[in-house]
Amino acid sequence: MTPPRHKAPGFTLIETLIVIAIIGALAALVIPVTSSFLKKSRQAACLGNLRQIGIAIESYLQDHNQIMPNLEAGRNSRSEEVPVMDNTLIDYLSNEEVFHCPEDKTLFRDTGSSYLWNSTQSNRPRHRLVFFNVRGDPARVPLVSDKEAWHPGEGGVNILYADFTASQDIKFTTTP
């Protein structure tokens, strides 16, 4: 009589393949969800940057008799010597990273800002802001926006309004 054979410890090939298939299926479910969370967190960081820019504008207004800064919308490179947000408002902010949207991979590095100033509001008294014939409603006058549609959602652009709220919602409309 031959003694019974003991099975060697370990996994069979089939068991190993099943485990790998399960891990692959779980990864396929988790990666898109994680990516979506990361994009939403970067959008929230961008909105935070816009709110900080709003605080800087408020401080600027207090120092300049409630007159909006006279700025260009943006510049093509950091070497251009034109008044823009990043070189005019930097004294009112903790660091230049406030001008960097986390979704922006190149524009901040090249131009110094991920955001555009609404130059139609340049040099205007705070109480006389107007946009598309909307007067007297700072919640509908955009001051700063993303340079590109980087964020998830319909418009993909975050906007800072003259009441210093920031959102992705379009609050201004044209009148017929």
Image (cartoon, grey):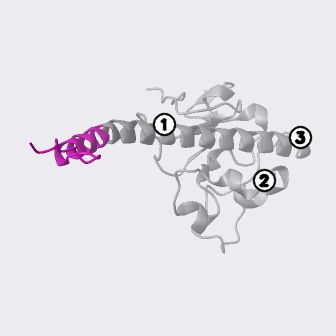
Read off the residue under disc 1: 37
Read off the residue under disc 3: 62
Outermost residue toward the bottom in this view:
79
**Residue at image coords 34%, 41%:** 27
Q: Secondary structure at mark 2?
A: loop
Outermost residue toward the front in this view:
1
Q: Secondary structure at mark 1?
A: helix
**Residue at image coords 63%, 50%:** 119
Q: Nearer the viewer, residue 88 or 70?
A: 88
- Tag 1: Cα neighbours inside 10 Å, few (<14), some, or many (≥20)? few
Q: Does residue 8 sit above or below 25 in this rendering?
A: below
Q: Does residue 132 sit above or below 118 in this rendering?
A: above
Q: Quadrant of residue 63?
A: top right
Q: Which residues are magenta?
A: 1-25
Residue 118 screen position, x and y as percent: 62, 46
Residue 124 screen position, x and y as percent: 74, 43
Q: Nearer the viewer, residue 169 or 129?
A: 169
**Residue at image coords 65%, 26%:** 139
* Gap in angstroms between the C-alphas marked 3 and 2: 13 Å
The three-letter amino acid code for the residue at tag 1 is: Phe
> Which of the two discs, 2 and 1, labels the residue nearer the N terminus?
1
- Can you say which quadrant of the picture contains the C terminus? top left
18 inside magenta stretch: yes
- Asked whether the viewer can see residue 100, the reply is yes
Read off the residue under disc 2: 89
Q: Quadrant of residue 161?
A: top right
* Gap in angstroms between the C-alphas marked 1 and 3: 38 Å
Q: Is residue 171 left or right of residue 19?
A: right
Q: Secondary structure at mark 3?
A: helix
The three-letter amino acid code for the residue at tag 2 is: Leu
